């Protein structure tokens, strides 16, 4: 078999494995084997650029960058749905459309109403050619590159599909992926996302499709658009399933309102167990002929309706508002509630997010407030019972000083959160930072938990993370709950942390906006704390994904005398401040600063950047006089081209670049 045949074979095989795994929930090969085959395909595609295929399974990995998403007009308008909330409204709807149709209608479908971002996908000759968001219903944004990274979206169809058609689906982010994403954000000192729905739509608009690929999005399909060659809606979806689309098995045929309601009740209870959010049920007339006869109103189809679940809501007393200080100094107001049962759990607290939110809700202490568990994980307050108001004296006064250190709070323009600026003296922040330092994702120090950090701090034994390294047995043994064994564990854990690589140390310092990924990039690029400390903003800009926000934050950090002393003390204690030397594939690009620009045929931008670094080169983020050359792809911006010409920086095509290696 020649390479060309092998490429086609691998693509077929990988499409099939993907479909089995992500749509049918069946594993045909081990993860390892799958990765091996994917790598083989990547290598072959790299060597045979002429066989480029925009729908190759290698596209799932992402890596293309979209600066702005072109607006595209939908072939068929994307309507919204009318809502109903009760049995009465539902039977009114059936009566209404039966009257309109002039006969009884005896077959409907019930589907879940997946709560995510709607998408229209166009397929041609079995290949995904375009994916567009709903937008205003008439026009949406072309987010094809990002949608291609979603694992259960078929890039290539099987079976007897039509040559050209559109299909609609909802892209959702399951709870588990949502929570993991938020954990990561919190660890990096970023605000957690509010709910899976907004996060799913936000994920479609990320500029780097490699980042979208990291999010475990899924797409559920619910309608073929503009093709009436099927007798019923249900038949069309069963067909779509056979071509490789994920049409959830929850779809049911029903005959009347009673059966609709039993579907609604069933899922109203079971929705708690679903791995993703639904906000109701969608009921559609099954016959396509009847659908066509009923047609559309200005806003929605007459032949479909949604039955929305009411978010479960309870009233309880707002007892007080307390304020939490995070390790970055951000203040979060928290409502303390009279404990109350809501969707199976006892709720005592609800987040109030920030001062604006409190003002908007216009709450007073003592109010009976309505608490709801919607898409958000933490319950929220949605309003109050106006008939039972507390007195005006009980209006909530947002605090002006830090609840912990009494420093006057500040609010940065454009940010919703208040901050305690006393970074170096605020106990909660200090303890929070040390807790972050010892945490599992950071230096992972065994033998110290969050409480121990608090204890050591309050005993005056540690003021910062570097002080951990001068702790000794005599100081620790007299402390409460510090038996000989725990002291040994703790000291051994601290000792072992000296083996942690530099990138972990850098992350552990808790510099704002320097999360695990950024720390790793910086560590690899600069190789040592010393070099990083001395790096100029221009040098920092050369690192992939490092922008002004991070540069400013690093600058501020290294300006502070105490921080420098901490670093020196850590260094003196033997904590790694130097990265490991990277093993290079070659040194063909040593000393060269290379900028990557445009869209490429064979490689993604990320692949190109890795190639450059693996061969000893440095990736520059913008063209300057220091740039050795630019690897230029298609549709490189004209202003960049001009700049390169003006500075005399050569442009090299993708193929010529690959030949250099
Ligand atoms: P709404 O946005 O409330 O008007 O509801 C309409 C939206 O519900 C559609 O644009 C779809 O994105 C979404 N949706 C979710 N599940 C379904 C489904 N099973 N059938 C039709 N639409 C659905
Ligand atoms: Zn404070």
Image (cartoon, rainbow, N blue to C red):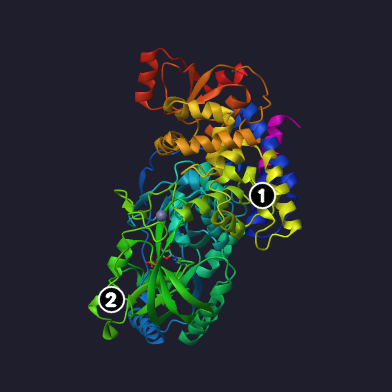
Of residues 199 and 228, the one nearer the viewer is: 199
Q: Secondary structure at mark 1?
A: loop
Residue with the most extreme top position: 648
Q: Is residue 55 magenta?
A: no
Ligand 1's image quarter is bottom left
- Label 2: few (<14), some or many (≥20) within 10 Å? some
Provide residue 126's location: percent of width, then percent of height: 56, 48
Query: Is 615 on the left-hand or right-hand side of 132?
Result: right
Query: What is the spatial separation of the Cα atoms under label 2 and label 1, in whole angstroms?
Result: 46 Å
Residue 362 in sight: yes
Magenta part of the chain: 1-11
Residue 483: mark in rendering = none
Q: Secondary structure at mark 2?
A: helix
Residue with the most extreme left position: 392
Provide residue 486's location: percent of width, then percent of height: 72, 57
Provide residue 198's location: percent of width, then percent of height: 43, 58
- Residue at image x 37%, y 42%? 70
Query: Is 553 on the left-hand or right-hand side of 488?
Result: left
Provide residue 175's location: percent of width, then percent of height: 54, 63
Residue 55 in sight: no
């Amino acid at each position: 078999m020649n390479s060309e045949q092998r490429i086609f074979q691998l693509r077929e095989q990988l499409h099939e494995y993907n479909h089995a795994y992500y749509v049918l929930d069946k594993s045909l090969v081990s993860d390892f084997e799958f990765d091996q085959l994917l790598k083989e395909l990547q290598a072959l595609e790299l060597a045979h650029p002429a066989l480029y295929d925009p729908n190759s399974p290698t596209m799932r990995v992402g890596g293309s960058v979209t600066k702005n998403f072109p607006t595209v007009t939908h072939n068929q308008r994307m309507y919204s749905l009318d809502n109903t909330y009760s049995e009465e409204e539902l039977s009114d709807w059936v009566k209404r459309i039966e009257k309109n149709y002039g006969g009884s209608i005896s077959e409907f479908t019930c589907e879940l109403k997946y709560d995510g971002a709607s998408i229209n996908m166009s397929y041609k000759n079995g290949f995904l050619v375009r994916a567009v968001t709903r937008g205003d219903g008439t026009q949406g944004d072309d987010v094809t590159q990002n949608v291609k990274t979603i694992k259960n979206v078929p890039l290539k169809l099987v079976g007897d599909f039509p040559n050209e058609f559109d299909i609609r689906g909802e892209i959702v982010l399951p709870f588990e992926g949502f929570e993991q994403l938020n954990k990561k954000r919190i660890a990096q000192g970023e605000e957690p996302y509010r709910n899976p729905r907004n996060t799913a739509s936000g994920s479609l608009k990320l500029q780097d499709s490699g980042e979208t690929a990291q999010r475990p999005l899924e797409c559920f399909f619910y309608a073929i658009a503009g093709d009436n060659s099927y007798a019923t809606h249900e038949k069309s979806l069963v067909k779509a399933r056979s071509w490789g689309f994920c049409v959830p098995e929850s779809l049911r045929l029903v005959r009347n309102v009673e059966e609709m309601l039993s579907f609604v009740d069933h899922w109203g209870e079971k929705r708690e167990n679903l791995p993703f959010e639904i906000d109701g049920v969608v009921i559609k007339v099954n016959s396509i002929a009847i659908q066509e006869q009923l047609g559309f109103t200005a806003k929605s189809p007459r032949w479909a309706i949604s039955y929305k679940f009411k978010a479960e809501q309870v009233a309880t007393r707002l007892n007080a508002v307390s304020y939490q200080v995070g390790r970055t100094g951000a203040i979060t107001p928290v409502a303390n509630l009279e404990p109350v049962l809501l969707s199976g759990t006892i709720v005592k607290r609800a987040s109030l997010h920030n001062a604006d939110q409190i003002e908007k809700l216009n709450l007073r202490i003592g109010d009976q407030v309505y608490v709801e568990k919607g898409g958000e994980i933490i319950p929220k307050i949605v309003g109050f019972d106006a008939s039972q108001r507390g007195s005006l004296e009980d209006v909530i006064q947002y605090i002006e000083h830090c609840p912990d250190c009494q420093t006057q709070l500040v609010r940065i323009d454009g940010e919703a959160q208040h901050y305690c600026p006393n970074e170096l003296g605020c106990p909660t922040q200090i303890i929070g930072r040390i807790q972050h330092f010892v945490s599992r994702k950071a230096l992972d120090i065994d033998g110290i938990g969050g409480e121990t950090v608090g204890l050591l701090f309050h005993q005056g034994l540690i003021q910062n993370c570097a002080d951990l390294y001068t702790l000794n047995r005599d100081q620790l043994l007299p402390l409460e709950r510090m038996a000989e064994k725990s002291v040994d564990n703790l000291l051994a854990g601290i000792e072992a942390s000296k083996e942690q690589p530099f990138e972990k140390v850098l992350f552990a310092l808790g510099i704002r906006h320097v999360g695990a990924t950024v720390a790793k990039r910086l560590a690899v690029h600069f190789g040592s704390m010393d070099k990083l400390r001395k790096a100029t903003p221009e040098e920092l800009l050369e690192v992939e994904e490092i922008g002004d926000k991070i540069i400013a934050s690093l600058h501020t950090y290294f300006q502070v005398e105490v921080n420098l002393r901490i670093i020196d003390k850590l260094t003196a204690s033997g904590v790694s401040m130097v990265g490991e030397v990277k093993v290079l594939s070659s040194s063909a690009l040593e000393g060269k600063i290379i900028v990557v620009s445009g869209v490429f045929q064979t490689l993604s931008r990320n692949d190109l950047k890795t190639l450059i670094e693996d061969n000893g080169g440095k990736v520059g983020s913008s063209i300057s006089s220091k740039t050795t050359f630019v690897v230029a792809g298609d549709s490189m911006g004209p202003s960049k081209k001009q700049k390169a010409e003006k500075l005399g920086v050569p442009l090299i095509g993708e193929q010529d670049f690959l030949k250099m290696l």
